[in-house]
Amino acid sequence: HTDEVIEMGEAPAKALRAKKKASVVLTVDSVAKGESQGLVAAGSTGAAMAASLFGLGRLPGVKRPVICCTMPTSKKPIALLDGGANSDCEPEMLLEFAIMGKIFAQLILGYENPRLGLMNIGEEEGKGNELAKATYNLLTTKKEKLNFIGNVEGRDTFTGDVHVIICDGFVGNVILKTAEGAFKMVTKLLKAECKSSFVNMLIAILAKNI
């Protein structure tokens, strides 16, 4: 039990120093001591990330931790990295995300040799900002080891044709929140249409299980 809470609007590092008995700090400590094998955080993502970074440390060779989002597709789920932990990135960081993403897709999502793509504004080589161009060149040097297929676009997030999508946290978080908003909109429109007439209501009742 704890009486200390890190609020959503608090600066993570400052809050962690001031609230050493907050639930996220205690759960990370439990993992560090081997009392737990993992933790679930339903509050501030920044606080969870910072607490894990300070309390558990980093894997050797990993400069920054990353948020991996499992995204639904028309086929099997895929991995999107980074979902919002690092808004300013270097090409070397995205290479690390690619390596971690491939391992996650293999061990957790079950892909034997996952296809990895770099999120960009076009599929052609040379597209995008400086980060995208530099990262493309860097990933190309590891093309066979990572099964790097090149640039992908936003629409490819939901096709299931690419199994790991790499981007900085700014872009990844926009993709994630846009998908959430689109889902809510479609659900709202569908419910409204189902209630728009007696016939539609009957159809909705018959199709409820589907």
Image: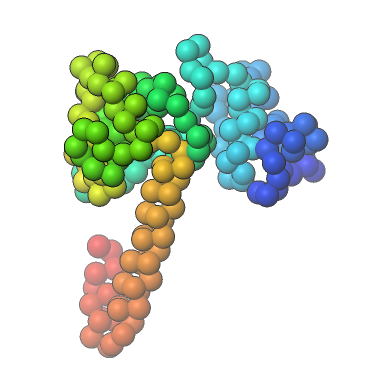
- Asked if residue 12 lies left or right of residue 130, the reply is right
Q: Check the image and report above or below for 183 versus 10.
A: below
Residue sitting at x 34%, y 73%? 189
Q: In which quarter of the image is residue 160?
A: top left
Residue sitting at x 37%, y 22%? 95
Q: Quadrant of residue 23?
A: top right
Q: Check the image and report above or below for 194 versus 96.
A: below
132 vs 101, nearest the viewer = 132
Q: Give the x, y percent position of residue 178.
A: 40, 55
Q: Check the image and report above or below for 172 versus 164.
A: below
Numbered disc total: 0
Q: Quadrant of the C terminus?
A: bottom left
Can residue 79 be seen from the camera position used here?
Answer: no
Q: Give the x, y percent position of residue 154.
A: 29, 47
Q: Quadrant of residue 202?
A: bottom left
Q: In which quarter of the image is the N terminus?
A: top right
Q: Tell which residue pokes out farthest to the bottom in this image.
A: 198
Q: Give the x, y percent position of residue 113.
A: 22, 23
- Asked if residue 138 lies left or right of residue 4, the reply is left
- Asked if residue 143 lies left or right of residue 167, the reply is left
Q: Check the image and report above or below for 132 versus 6.
A: above
15 vs 25, nearest the viewer = 15
Residue sitting at x 60%, y 18%? 57
